[in-house]
Amino acid sequence: MGIIERIKEIEAEMARTQKNKATEYHLGQLKAKIAKLRTQLLEPPKGSSAGGDGFEVTKFGHGRVALIGFPSVGKSTLLTMLTGTHSEAASYEFTTLTCIPGIIHYNDTKIQLLDLPGIIEGASEGKGRGRQVIAVAKSSDLVLMVLDASKSEGHRQILTRELESVGLRLNKRPPQIYFKKKKTGGISFNSTLPLTHVDEKLCYQILHEYKIHNAEVLFREDATVDDLIDVIEGNRKYIKCVYVYNKIDVIGIDDVDKLARRPNSVVISCNLKLNLDRLLWKMWEEMGLVRVYTKPQGQQPDFSDPVVLSADRGGCTVEDFCNHIHRNLIKDVKYVLVWGTSARHYPQHCGLGHVLQDEDVVQIVKKKEKEEGGRGRFKSHSTAPARISDRQKKAPLKT
């Protein structure tokens, strides 16, 4: 029996099992088994040197956005509208067969937009090059899930389920669970608040399913069984997602209003070029890019070429800003002058831990090199020896 058949068998058993206090331990073990099998499914086959043929796309720009959706929902048309890069679009499905990159120039930054082939149900099991598509999505900073506004809501649920089954968690934050394996000492289970979904016995059973018998577990929030399994697996990717409903020109205004009020959703029409500026603003807000302008001493700030930072790519502190310019610069920094929304007054003297905000202006003041003893007649000491006994005696005069 293959891995996919075993996963389907366990899912059928979970569907048959009633959910109550008596069966929650059994269901927890089944969830752990499915997570283990899905991790094995993602691993490359033994004996192969490479991980398979994926889409080779070099990272470019200050951020990467992936377009994911079913075939013929308007992904290629959206890429052409936003970037100007031509991506073939036709009235039949699977027009795009490989990854096509484009660049969005927005707010003095460059954002890489990737048009991926449409994925279908069962993509996590490898159908329709689904694994390659999802692998590119894992390396992105933001996922744009393009949906057809005229189709049913089930498409969004199917895509979310396919992405979650390969370890992508959309619009979620990592659970506040501390987990560390140990060599000896057994399992230490603690929590800082009352737990309603997990107890000590269930935690022990899930850890034993992974053959972990010595570990330290600390719950800092009321997490579920799935959160605990995600922490134990350790290969989950938490990524932001914006749901883009295309083709709103074929549905009624009431349906458009209902879709637009959903969280993390934007309604657009590529055919009539409606609401594309709102989509760009939403992408910018979700990615959290921070533009920082440099100011040389005694000169005007340079507003033409900003240094772009983000919390997902390194951080937004002054230290990250210095490392972005040059890794050895941080040794010479004496203090930093900051103008902008992050400063309390202009200019503010800041240290390396100061968090920068969008459109701040930064001037770096370096440490001065110490000159030995000053210059000219202001020298603090002469070149003569400090002690008289160390002076060299002159040779006696010849008579």
Image (spheres, rainbow, N blue to C red):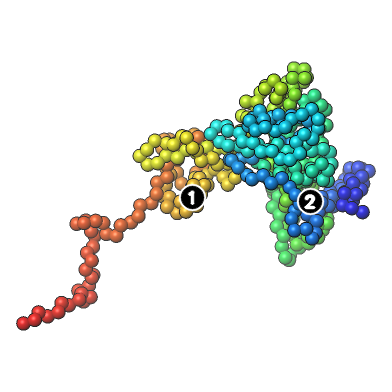
In front of the other: 67 or 292: 67
Judging by the rendered image, the residue that carries numbered circle 2 is 42
Residue 19 percent location from the top left of the image: 89, 42
Task: Check whether the beta carbons of the residues at disc 1 and disc 2 lie within 8 A of each other.
Answer: no
The secondary structure type at the circle numbered 1 is: loop
Of all residues, the one furthest to the left in this rendering is 399
Q: Residues within 10 Å of mark 1 (few under 14, many from 20)?
A: few
On the rendered structure, is 77 left or right of 61? right
Q: Residues within 10 Å of mark 2 (few under 14, many from 20)?
A: some
Q: Is 286 placed above or below 176 here?
A: above
- Distance between the alpha carbons at the discs numbered 1 and 2: 37 Å
On the rendered structure, is 288 left or right of 399? right
The secondary structure type at the circle numbered 2 is: helix
Judging by the rendered image, the residue that carries numbered circle 1 is 326
Q: Is residue 293 visible?
A: yes
Instruction: Please report whichever mark, 1 or 2, sits nearer to the chain's N-terminal start.
Output: 2
- The quarter in which the C terminus is drawn is bottom left
Q: Amino acid at mark 1?
A: His
**Residue at the (81%, 26%) spot, across then down:** 151
